Amino acid sequence: MKRLNDFRMNMGRDELVPIMIGGMGVDISSADLALEAARLGGVGHISDAMIKTVTDRRYKTKYVKAKQALYKYQPGTDDKSNVQFDMGHLAEATRLHVESTMSRKQGSGRIFINCMEKLTMNAPKETLKVRMASALDAGIDGITLAAGLHLGSFALIEDHPRFRDAKLGIIVSSLRALQLFIKKNSRLNRLPDYVVVEGPLAGGHLGFGMDWAQYDLATIVAEILAYMKAENLNIPVIPAGGIFTGSDAVRFMEMGASGVQVATRFTVTKECGLPDDIKQEYFKATEDDIEVNEISPTGYPMRMIKSSPGIGDGIRPNCEAYGYLLDANGKCAYVSAYNREVLANPEAKRISVKDKTCLCTHMRNFDIWTCGHLTARLKDTTLRHADGSYQLLSAQHVFEDYQFSTNGQVKLPDAEALPN
Ligand SMILES: Cc1cc2nc3c(=O)[nH]c(=O)nc-3n(C[C@H](O)[C@H](O)[C@H](O)COP(=O)(O)O)c2cc1C
């Protein structure tokens, strides 16, 4: 019986352990987590979602305060087009996070950065260009373009000196999205170095509608592999979403995948950026506690734990400080929903907004608990302490469990004493 470690992920000249830990925004896939994946010979991701918040927290910068000081909150207006990002600060923050991470890198693996197109940041093209170029300047090994079709994203950095040497990958959820990407980028003579195929069981935003349950990752991967073969394309295909054990991964490798991207099992590791009390919520969640809803202002369905404090909350938007989801016209669906509720309830001290959530503020505060479909199985991957809490895992333990397990088994950790 094969183990995942019997395979290797070839990407250019790199020969990697075929495990990629997926990007998890607002510092859930922390530098520490990504560094462990690289040390163990795989690929880890940091994320540039809300990068200024991340650097303020991690490196004691003051970017958020500086932005907020420039703009005054204007009640009732849906138009935030004046609230612009300072490109110099954006570049500095990205550079700081990437350089600091890369300077600590050990081992033969790689560290990529997850860049979501849907973080439109009030100037989609200009900000994405700065984000990608600064990450390349700072020495990132690769960029994974997520949450969008990315039809023009490669072109934004075609003049960058590292355009052809850094690894550039895309995330797609259908063959059609991949075909569109390849067609639109043909002029650049630059194919992606890898394609992550994300199915409907993934965490975060989904590349499907609310009919996500009708799709199946293995079917989409098979279609994409057949297309690659027919077109003589040699691009590593990396399935993601609901790959919970090493044996699940081996099934995809035997189909012809080059590696797998996984995330949910790492949300309960010590290195993961979620606060420890929230990791316990992930352990506790049952199948019934998880839903896919449409409250993200991005317009994509998102999977989350139903008891996330941010669901239904009517917090005042703070685009002046954050504003990562403002579109090219300075609009965000949450701002409009919030203003509608304030207008409808003029006397209320606290309002509730049910149809949208203030994703910036709530992801910053870890109040939207996005998760993969198989989160309910996390409790079976560890031991329980006498006080009812679950033992956190090390990233190395989970990584090696994917690498070496057989027969769908999950290896439990050695018992540890409760921390004081
Ligand atoms: C907590 C969490 C946050 C995520 N955030 C992002 C993100 O910011 N960008 C992204 O491209 N994918 C995101 N994802 C998706 C993962 O990178 C990954 O592709 C997917 O969850 C893999 O499936 P699995 O969680 O079942 O292993 C997130 C997943 C989780 C669990």
Image: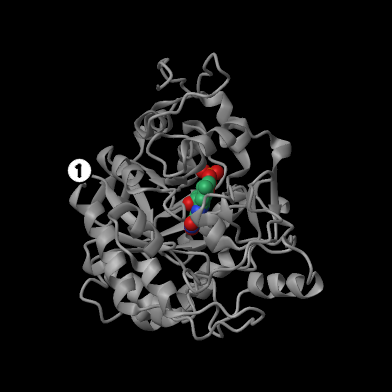
Q: Quadrant of residue 314?
A: bottom right
**Residue 36 seen from this side:** yes
Q: Residue flagged by tag 1: what amino acid is it?
A: Gln
Q: Quadrant of the N terminus?
A: top left
- Image location of residue 178, percent across then percent down: 51, 67
Side (left or right) of 203 relative to 105 = right
- Image location of residue 24, percent across then percent down: 46, 52
- Image location of residue 284, percent across then percent down: 62, 31
Q: Quadrant of residue 59?
A: bottom left
Question: Is 394 or 338 nearer to us in this picture?
Answer: 338
Q: Secondary structure at mark 1?
A: loop
Side (left or right) of 189 relative to 407 = left
Question: Is 119 or 342 nearer to us in this picture?
Answer: 342
Vertical arrangement, residue 409 with respect to residue 338, above or below: above
Q: Residue at x 65, y 73 (%)?
A: 333
Q: Quadrant of residue 413?
A: top left
Q: Residue at x 23, y 67 (%)?
A: 165
In the rendered image, which residue does mark 1 sit on?
A: 106
Question: Is 186 or 296 nearer to us in this picture?
Answer: 296
Q: Residue at x 69, y 45 (%)?
A: 306
- Image location of residue 248, percent across then percent down: 52, 36
Vertical arrangement, residue 39 with respect to residue 224, above or below: above
Side (left or right) of 293 relative to 245 = right
